[in-house]
Image: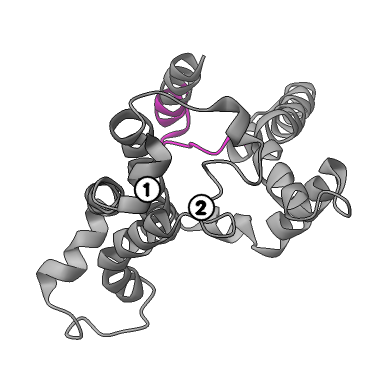
Amino acid sequence: AMTLFAFVGVVVTSASAIIYGSPEWDPVQLAGKFESKIVVTFAMIGIIISTLATNIAANIVSPANDFSNLSPKKISFRTGGYITGVIGILIFPWKLMADPHGYIFTWLIAYSSLLGPVGGIMIVDYFFIRKKQLLLNDLYDTNGSYTYTKGFNPAAVIALILGILPNVPGFLLQVKLVSETTFPVWISSLYHYAWFVGFAVSALLYYFLMKYNSRVKQRLV
């Protein structure tokens, strides 16, 4: 489905370049160029429905659960969804979309610098540390093997922070908080490969921190 969706997007954008003289990737802007009011109306209804369906069925589920898990007795899934919606409006996403350069190099790459380390830690933990073996009961036990130190795994936290750090100079340069001469070029350039750098650094650090920690070894036995 995702491949088909991407293919349709490429085809439609390419067709708009032939029909209107310039490529238009924004479906809202593209719908505004149609001459028939009926076609425009149906197109906008389709965009509204698809936006609501995507956000309700997919995008809002994870953050709503995250907020609910912070305080299950006080924050329900619905309340978590409302909080997510409010935050989604407050971050002005339309401003990110208005500038492709800012959207790609400021938002997407910065976001990937956080996801890369998380992915590296999770993959190493499941495949290399636990050998694809999980204690299901302990996943729901606050005193189980995965509780660690008050619910946090120090090795994972350290690996996460150190995996993010190499990308910070490039991010600061991208948002113009520092000058180009503040950091060496090779350090600030790491930001362009943020996901891969964060993934590799966190994965390696987490592996060694977990592998040679005596307390962790006892938990894995």
Residue at the (36%, 55%) spot, across then down: 113
Residue 191 locus on image (x, y percent): 26, 61
- Asked whether, in this view, residue 128 is left or right of residue 91, the answer is left
Q: Is residue 106 visible?
A: yes
Q: Amino acid at mark 1?
A: Val
Q: Earlier in the sequence, mark 2 or mark 1?
A: 2
Residue 213 locus on image (x, y percent): 29, 53
Please identify the dominant SS of the magenta region.
helix
- Asked whether, in this view, residue 129 is left or right of residue 89, the answer is left
For this rendering, which residue is in front, 93 or 27?
A: 93
Badge 2 is on which residue? 148
Q: Amino acid at mark 2?
A: Tyr
> Dot 2, how many residues are within 10 Å of its Cα: few (below 14), some (14-19), or many (20+)?
some
Residue 87 locus on image (x, y percent): 72, 59
Residue 32 locus on image (x, y percent): 66, 37
Numbered range of the magenta stretch: 12-27
Residue at the (78%, 57%) spot, across then down: 86
> Dot 1, how many residues are within 10 Å of its Cα: few (below 14), some (14-19), or many (20+)?
some
How does the figure colour the protein chain or chains?
A: one colour
Q: Secondary structure at mark 1?
A: helix
Question: Is residue 26 found inside the magenta-colored segment of the image?
Answer: yes
Residue at the (24%, 56%) spot, across then down: 192
- Give me the disc on residue 216: 1
Q: Is residue 197 visible?
A: no
Report which quarter residue 91 is drawn in: bottom right
Could you tell me how far apart the alpha carbons at marks 2 and 1 are, in whole angstroms? 9 Å
Q: Quadrant of the C terminus?
A: top left
- Asked whether, in this view, residue 29 is left or right of residue 169, the answer is right
For this rendering, which residue is in front, 172 or 210?
A: 210
